[in-house]
Each structure stands twice: as C-alpha cells, then as structure tokens.
Image: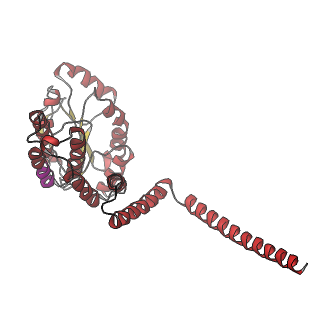
Amino acid sequence: MGHSLNKSGTIKREFLNMKKITLLAATLIIFSIGNLFADTANEIIEKFTKQSAEALEAYLQKNPTASDKSEAIDFLIQSYARLNMTERQTELLKSKYDGLAKGAELVPQEFFGVFQELFALLMKTGSKDGAKEALEDAKKAIVGHPQAERFSQFLDQMGGELNKPTVGDKMEMQFTSLDGKKVDLNDMKGKVILIDFWATWCGPCIAELPNVIDAYEKYHDEGFEIIGISLDNAKDENKLKQFVKDKNMPWPQAFDGKGWQNSLAKKFGITSIPATFLIGKDGKVASSNLRGPALGKAVKKELGL
C-alpha cells in the first residue's frame, strides 16, 4: 500500500510539473505571438531574414566546404538584397562569380545570370569603376568558348549601361520639346526634377503613370518638375500628342521620333523603360527607377517637406 501511495504521489508530482512546463510553454507562445502581432509584416520578415542570414553566416564559417554551400550563398544573396545590405551582397556575388567555370568550360546560362546580377548591383550602388572592371573581366572569361563572338556582342551592349547616370552624377540635356519650347536642364537648378524615359507603347510605363501624375499634382507647386523623354517612333507623333493631352501631362516631352535610337536615350545608356532619375536641388541624381509610392516619398524628401 505504502509503495502504491508513493507511486501515486510521484505520478501526481510529475503531473503537476508537466502542467507547469505546459503553462510556461503556452505563456512563451502567447508572448511570441503577441510580439508578432505588435510588428508589421515587413518588420517580421526583416527580423527573421536577419536571423536566418546570421545563422547561415555562422554555419558557413564552421563548414567552409559544406556540400550545400552554394544553396546557402544563394539564400544569403537574396536575404541581403531584401535587407538592402549591398556591401555584403556584392562580396557574395563576386565570390560566386569567381567560382564559375570560364573559357571553353563556361556554362552560358549560369555565367551570365550571375554576371548580370553583379553588374546591375554595382551600377545600382554607384560603383561604375567596379562595373567596368567586371565587364572587362567577363570579356576575358569568354575567350575560348565556341560562342565567344556572340557573347562579346552581348557584353558590348551591356557596356552601354556604363553611360547610365548613377547617384551623384550630373545630367546635362537641352532639347526642343514636343510643343516647340526650348528646354535646358541647367536652367532648372534649384528644383527637384524627375527625368522619365517612357513610351506610349510601354505597358509598365503606362501602369506607373498614375503615380507620376499624382506626385506632380501634389508637389509641383513646391518646386517639383518632370521632363518626359518619349521613345515613340516618328509615325506615332500625333498619337503621342493626343496621349499627353488626354492624360493631362503638362510637363515638357523630348521626342525625336527615333524610338530606341533616341539621342538622349543613347547618351544616357537607356536599354529598358520605364527608366527614371530623380534630380535633387543640387542638380545631381538623388535616386533612380523609383516605383509606386516610393516616388512621392523621395520627391517629398528631396523638397525638404
């Protein structure tokens, strides 16, 4: 009987301990959930992205020759892109690029996928010298490949982007607008200006237009201007004029009817549209390719409002 009572008491104590542990776990879960709901979705994503990146960095330090190293690096590159940690993102991309096969063994899809990502990141962060160096290295890397000549043409085309303005650059342009007025960007110094390369046939350009118009209507009286540069062809001049009128776009439009051969597009290395550059009051590029609400926020910031 005594043994039976002792066993029963032990079971009871264990049951009570389990209840305490369960209650503690439930409290921790509720606390964690409370914290999750206290943050915004973006804050939660950023928090866990940082934690995942830190854990993977530690893993790679302990296991530098891990069989899944490539997958870990790919995840880190994506994570640092989301966190806008461009310095580490660039380091990892360079490391990945350096490890690719070159010459006759080069795998085109893999090689150019990584190279384009690295080149675009260097351009985005204003490292034109770095982008130029990467381009020269890529030209050497394709030597000996059966399709080297075709690859060289592609790289030359990419090289045109080295003319594309980056943060801190000054843009110079003079033209006669679609309505016959002389426009000189230098005469607009002291204002915040959006340079917008677009075309009536460009779906993404048209989709972005409401944000552009909204920013103009909100901030024009505060010193915000827009210069449109149309890549429409000569045959579409009347269509362009009607479109500008119908959409109530009162800002000047540069148009020479040459499409992708537009003189200003060639001068500034424009190879895709929409392409936009926000010029600050100092006459230098403050940011580029802003989309959605980010445009209005950037304009407001540059105006000092």
Q: In the picture, which quadrant includes the C terminus?
A: bottom left
Residue 250 quadrant: top left
Foreground of the two, 9 or 141: 9
Foreground of the two, 60 or 11: 11
Residue 85 quadrant: bottom left
Q: Where's residue 300, x and y in %? A: 34, 53
Q: Where's residue 64, x and y in %? A: 30, 63
Return the residue found at the far top.
Answer: 235
Give the number of marks. 0
- Is 82 located above or below residue 232 in the figure? below
Residue 173 makes an appearance in the image? no
Q: Where's residue 272, x and y in %? A: 23, 36
Left or right, 14 with respect to 134, comes to: right
The residue stretch that appears in magenta = 128-134
Foreground of the two, 156 or 298: 156
- Is 88 located above or below residue 119 in the figure? below
Residue 155 quadrant: top left
Left or right, 83 with respect to 167, comes to: right
Queried whether the magenta region covers residue 65, the answer comes back as no
- Is 277 located above or below residue 69 in the figure? above
Foreground of the two, 100 or 304: 100
Q: Where's residue 287, x and y in %? A: 26, 51
Return the residue found at the far bottom.
Answer: 2
Q: Main secondary structure of the magenta part?
A: helix
Which residue is rendered at x = 30% and y = 60% of the image? 65
Which residue is rendered at x = 21% and y = 40% of the image? 107
